[in-house]
Amino acid sequence: MIRAAHAIPTKTPYAQQVETDLLATLQPMGRPGRLWVASLLAVCGVALIALIIQLRNGLRVTGMNDMVSWGVYMTNFVFFIGISHAGTLISAILRVTGAEWRRPITRLAEAITVFALIIGASMIMIDMGRPDRLLNLIFHGRLSSPILWDLCSVTTYLTGSFIYLYVAMIPDMPMVLRDARLHGRSKWLVRFYELLAIGYKGTPAQERFLNRALGAMAVIIIPVAISVHTVVSWIFGMTVRPGWHSTIFGPYFVIGAIFSGTAALITAIALFRRAYRLHKYLTDDCLRKLAALLVALTLLYGYFTLSEYLTTWYGGLGTERRLIDLLMGASPYGVTFWFWAVTGLFIPLGLLIMPSKRSIGGIITASVLINIGMWLKRYLILVPTLETPWIPPHNSGVALTYSPTWVEWAITAGGFAAFMLLYTVFARVFPIVSIWEVAEDAEPAEKVADMKPRERFARPAFVAIRALLLAGGIGALGAVGATTRLQAQAAQPRGAQLVLTMAVVDEEERLVAAVTAAGRPFKGARVAFAVKRVFSPMALGEEVTGADGKASVPFPSTLPGDSTGALAVSAEIISPDRLAGTRGETLMPGAPVVRAEPNEAWPPRALWSTRAPIGVIATLCTLLSVVWCTYVFVIRQLVLIKLAGREERQHRYIR
């Protein structure tokens, strides 16, 4: 049962003790704490230098290449998205099912979710080499691409995690604010606490609104979290690559995320209860219950791993056989794979499987080994597959290898340091253990039973109405965005014109671009030629216009055209700057005719079609509308809490 902090204002002796103990964690840092923060800042500084070097020189400073285009950065992305499930699956599921032992660990788990998502999302932008090109995915993304699905799901999950963390913190804010004023903390921090408290006093009306908000978020964040790691797996599984193209990848990734997230939560509990001496609240019993959950997850993840690799090995396809030999044979990847299997699965299982032999030290050791092993496992999922193309590389004399450079390792270390730094700062600004939940745990059970179940969740009718309204808003925004793009495309530099024609020069068909400025041929303009393709333009080359204002390249007569034999070609002026952006497009005949197969299925498969099937669009829009409408509902409850606090103050003033 979800309840707000109604027990705290009563100031029972237990509640007073809880408040005193947990607010004591917000006192200024001692020397060990300052050294810890300084060391993390130093690592982040080195990572920043490495990032600047990468931004200036491009991805050539990394070990990635044309074939192995994903490496350590994408490994970090999958790993951090995985441990983010600690907050959702531990906090939300245990909150919904009424597991009372989860009260001291909920905020620890929810904070892991938020900060892991921040670091994981940043790794995507770092992996792109040009972070500004993320805008291309936003403005020119295709709904048939799982990468766009991933952008939508991660953004939705990060937003929901922030809201979920904040809503659960609201009852603590008045106590934190009072403590900050009492100890004379900085004015900006006091003002910050005032904003977050939103006038919460624990009145019955405010408690009712908080119950609704917390209940709605606890329910909706569970499917959102599951969808996020499922979509992450689809980035790999939707490609026709050995080791990736698997129907089991979705649940395999989700179980792996819960597995590593639970281990990360155990590690965080061990560190914080030692650093802040919180053994009274972060008890051995909490760790043992999480360890029991970790045993089940270890067995489940081992089962999925066996099922995945046994099926691949038994099938014996040529490319997949080479991948299995690379993963488990006499190679560096084979050593890493068996090291992960032993230290990331078998040793933790041996430490946790026997309840009578399950010591706290063994639980913590197992959790650390699992996190190390799961990072290695994500690396093994990524790199060996990219080094195993369908055509054996040695047949063409190519040696496919990937070795991360110091730049990649420095940025990776900086990512982990930034995660721990954010977590540390959060624990110094807010109570890392929820005061109201721990204090409420001592209340009589009959008070909890008095709660009306309908107060916990939003009414479905309101959510449905908001879904329709939000869907309309999304359509309106899409129309506005489309209009803006059309206007931008129509904008051309004045006074310049580019016309594409076909000409035969020395018995060779050539594509000719005639550039004029102010009505006269323009000499010295650099023109880039391209052919329009489904995924991205295919470059034909660049030429500079001569005295007649013309530049030409050979016409690609061997490229397949449309059903009439026409080829969509384009040309764009690159320089000089005052003419840059001038474009010309046309359909040129003479290309081989491409005819559809008579038995071609309709609609075509999503990845190979020029548009997403209507079912994909409808599903994505419906799911996102429901989730975001729930967020709107929760925000409305927060506004009502604020208004209820104002009404209470006015009522007291009148009296």
Image (cartoon, rainbow, N blue to C red):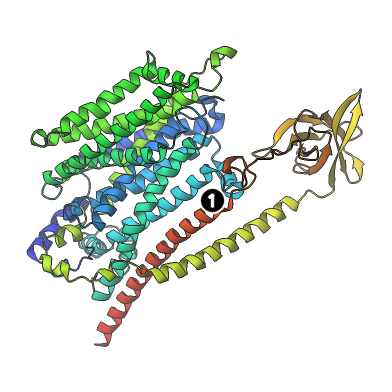
Q: How many marks?
A: 1
193 to 378, vertically: above or below: below
Q: Looking at the image, which is closer to me, 607 or 466?
A: 607
Element under label 1?
helix
Q: Does 241 sit left or right of 517 as displayed?
A: left
User: Where is 212 relative to 313, above or below?
Assistant: below
Residue assigned mark 1? 616
Residue 130: percent from left, percent from top: 56, 37
Where is the N terminus found, in terms of image quarters? bottom left
Q: Quadrant of residue 504?
A: top right
Q: Is residue 337 visible?
A: yes
Quadrant assignment for the C terminus = bottom left
Above or below residue 340? Residue 525 is: below
Q: Amino acid at mark 1?
A: Val
Residue found 79% across the figure and 29% down from its top: 556
Residue 11 visible in rendering: no
Left or right: 255 as drawn, with respect to 557 = left
Q: Residue furthest front?
A: 599
Describe residue 335's horizontal placement relative to residue 71 as left or right.
left
**x and y, in percent, of residue 630 in the image:** 40, 63
For label 1, the crowd category at 10 Å Cα-Cα, with few meaning under 14, some 14 to 19 and many 20 or more, is few
- The spot of residue 342 in percent (x, y) is 26, 23
Residue 425 lies, in percent from the top left, at 30, 47
Out of 248 and 502, give the one closest to the viewer: 248
Q: Residue at image x 91%, y 23%? A: 507
Q: Residue at x 17, y 56 (%)?
A: 100
